[in-house]
Image: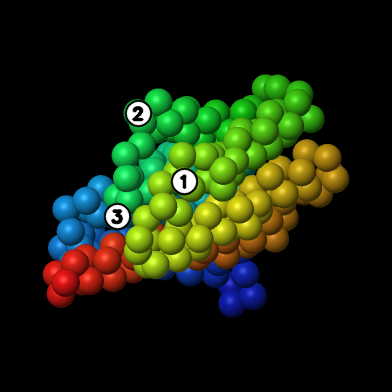
Amino acid sequence: MAVFQTTDLTAASYSVALFGLAATTILLLMGTAWVGRTWKVPIALCAIAALVGIGATFEGRAAWAANGSVPIVYHYVGWMVSMPLQIMAMFFFARTAGKLGAGLFWRLLIVAVLMVFVRYLGEAGFMHPTLAFLIGLVFWLYILGELYFGQMDDVVRSSTGDYLRRGYFWLRLIVTIGWAIYPLGNFLTAFAGIPDDGSLTVAYNVADILNRMAFGIAILATGALISNEVRHA
């Protein structure tokens, strides 16, 4: 078992993310019993995304303990699975308010996977970094466009429930602001030439509190409030 120094902030951030993701996973799985049937799928997807985050964080922590550095692959293997799962969760979140086409679902899923994969190709040197960064940015902007101006936004805005609109607002804000850390980190390492001495990893782990934990809890809270309102109607 690795013994970390008290001043090792990178190891500490891994531990905080690991324990926080574990607690979030348990809470979300328990929460599927507190909500109506239509809310179980988005909450379960967020629980799986948090569970994937546990595995990725554990592996990254072990790599840091062994080498004092974290290869980028340890970040991307988790994002490759968890980010598309979260986009799927947002789709089913909005679908509780109205009908959404299967075409939109598959477009969002494919774009989310490609967004992470192309960015990895650039950082790993399999693709020109500038081209990979720009393509990944375009994919992220496409997702934001769907969230702000597409069918999902129309369906949520036309709903009568304040809880749903408020929850969608916070989820969309997380994808806009919280997810910005990933292209920013890509830019700093690929273009500014800043090596990841552990500080960028700390930023990624802290961002997990918002991007994986708060994201899932926001969906759970929205589903629980709406389900409770329906039961007492």
Q: Along the polypeptide, which appears first: circle 1 or circle 2?
A: 2
- Residue 179: x and y in percent read 59, 51
Amino acid type indicated by mark 3:
Ile
The residue depicted at 68 percent of the width and 45 percent of the height is 183
Mark 1–mark 3 distance (CA, rounded to whole Å): 22 Å
Mark 1–mark 2 distance (CA, rounded to whole Å): 16 Å
Q: Which callout, 1 or 3, points to the residue nearer the camera?
A: 1
The residue at which mark 3 appears reads as 43
The secondary structure type at the circle numbered 3 is helix
In this view, the residue farthest toward the bottom is 6
Q: Which callout, 1 or 2, points to the residue nearer the camera?
A: 1
- Residue 131: x and y in percent read 75, 26
Assess disc 1: are there few (<14), some (14-19) or many (≥20) residues with their C-alpha within 10 Å of its C-alpha.
some
Amino acid type indicated by mark 2:
Ala
The residue depicted at 46 percent of the width and 39 percent of the height is 151
Q: Which mark is residue 102?
A: 2
- Residue 203: x and y in percent read 64, 61
Q: Along the polypeptide, which appears first: circle 1 or circle 3?
A: 3
Above or below 143: residue 5? below
Q: Along the polypeptide, which appears first: circle 3 or circle 2?
A: 3
- Examine the image and state in which quarter residue 202 appears: bottom right
The residue at which mark 1 appears reads as 154
Mark 3–mark 2 distance (CA, rounded to whole Å): 19 Å
